[in-house]
Structures are given as structure tokens and as C-alpha cells.
């Protein structure tokens, strides 16, 4: 069983997955910082100096100025500002993944073949050829024998 596990663990797919997870976690931290430290402060400044992290609804009825005050008092809150940050992070990550997959798919696409193999002499000839230039055999449209 240990031998089978070892073979499984060192297979390319498992290692690729592990590398992808580590890079994905690091990428998530970068996106979180981008949202919280770069995008949200100017956006908050445009919307009357609002810090999105501090947007919340106090459900206790007792007034609190910050989420930290409400949490320290044990008051229930709806932290919709943090939720907005998380949604923006998700959109950025989803868009980045879309771009990566799109680029990978474009690189993976094979060009359509422009040649075919002659059925008689097995030489490479253009797809549109009706006669093989090597053995002079007559070909059907699409590369078949006649």
C-alpha cells in the first residue's frame, strides 16, 4: 500500500495540483492586498471618505462607532463592508483565472492541418491536391484513393 501511495503522490498531476494550490494561496493574498490596500481606499475617498471595512449594521440597538467596539461589547453586527471587499476580491480572482484559462486554451489550440498523406506513397502533400506530385496517383477530394 505504501508503494502505491508513493506512486500516486509523485505522479505529475498530484505535484501540479500541489504547486497550483500554493501559488493560488499566494495569489489570493496578493488580491486581498490589492482590494484592501489599493482599490478600496480611493473608492472610499470618492464616496465621502468611507472605509468599507467599517460599514456595518448594528443589530443590538446600542450605538457603536466601529465594528471593533461592537465586537468588544459582544453586539451582533452585519458587516456588509467586509462582504463587499470579499465580493470584489472574488471578482478579481475569477477574472484573473478567466484570463489564465483563456490564454492557456489559445496556446493549446492546434492549427488545422494544411497537408495530408498520400494513400499510395505515404508522402506529405497539400490538402487541396488532386494528384500526388511524388507518385502521380490520382486522389479524391479530401485525400482518399480513386
Image (cartoon, rainbow, N blue to C red):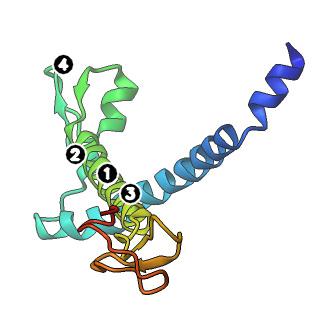
- Callout 4 touching callout 1 (CB < 8 Å): no
The residue shown at (13%, 21%) is: 61
The secondary structure type at the circle numbered 2 is: helix
Local crowd at mark 1 within 10 Å, few (<14), some, or many (≥20)?
A: few
- In the drawing, what numbered circle is on residue 60? 4
Q: Residue tagged by mark 2?
A: 84
* Mark 2 vs 1, N-terminal side: 2
Can you give x and y, in whole percent of width and height, for residue 105 in the image? 38, 60
Find residue 94 and name its label: 1
Asked if residue 119 lies left or right of residue 84, the reply is: right
User: Is 59 on the left or on the right of 7, as rendered?
Assistant: left
- Depth order, front residue of 38/59: 38
Q: Could you tell me how many numbered marks the image carries?
A: 4
Splitting the image into 4 quarters, where does residue 104 fall? bottom left
Q: Nearer the viewer, mark 4 or mark 1?
A: 1
Mark 3–mark 2 contact, CB under 8 Å? no
Where is mark 3, residue-wise?
101
The vertical placement of 56 against 6, above or below, is below
Q: Nearer the viewer, residue 88 or 10?
A: 10
Label whose residue precedes the other's in the sequence (3 or 1): 1
Q: Marks 3/1: CA distance?
A: 10 Å
Q: Position of residue 112 (x, y in %)?
A: 34, 69
- Alpha-carbon distance for marks 3 and 2? 26 Å
From the image, which quarter does the C terminus lie in?
Answer: bottom left
Task: Tell me which numbered mark, 2 or 4, is placed earlier along the sequence.
Answer: 4
Secondary structure category for the residue under label 4: loop
Amino acid at each position: 500500500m505504501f508503494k502505491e501511495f508513493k506512486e500516486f503522490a509523485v505522479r505529475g498531476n498530484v505535484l501540479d495540483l500541489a504547486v497550483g494550490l500554493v501559488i493560488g494561496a499566494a495569489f489570493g493574498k496578493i488580491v486581498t492586498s490589492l482590494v484592501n490596500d489599493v482599490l478600496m481606499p480611493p473608492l472610499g475617498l470618492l464616496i465621502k471618505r468611507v472605509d468599507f471595512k467599517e460599514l456595518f449594521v448594528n443589530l443590538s440597538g446600542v450605538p457603536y462607532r466601529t465594528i471593533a467596539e461592537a465586537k468588544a461589547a459582544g453586539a451582533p453586527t452585519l458587516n456588509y463592508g467586509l462582504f463587499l471587499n470579499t465580493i470584489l476580491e472574488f471578482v478579481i480572482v475569477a477574472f484573473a483565472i478567466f484570463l489564465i484559462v483563456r490564454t492557456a486554451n489559445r496556446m493549446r489550440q492546434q492549427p488545422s492541418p494544411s497537408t495530408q498523406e498520400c494513400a499510395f506513397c505515404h508522402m506529405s502533400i497539400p490538402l487541396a491536391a488532386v494528384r500526388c506530385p511524388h507518385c502521380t496517383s490520382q486522389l479524391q477530394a479530401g485525400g482518399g484513393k480513386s
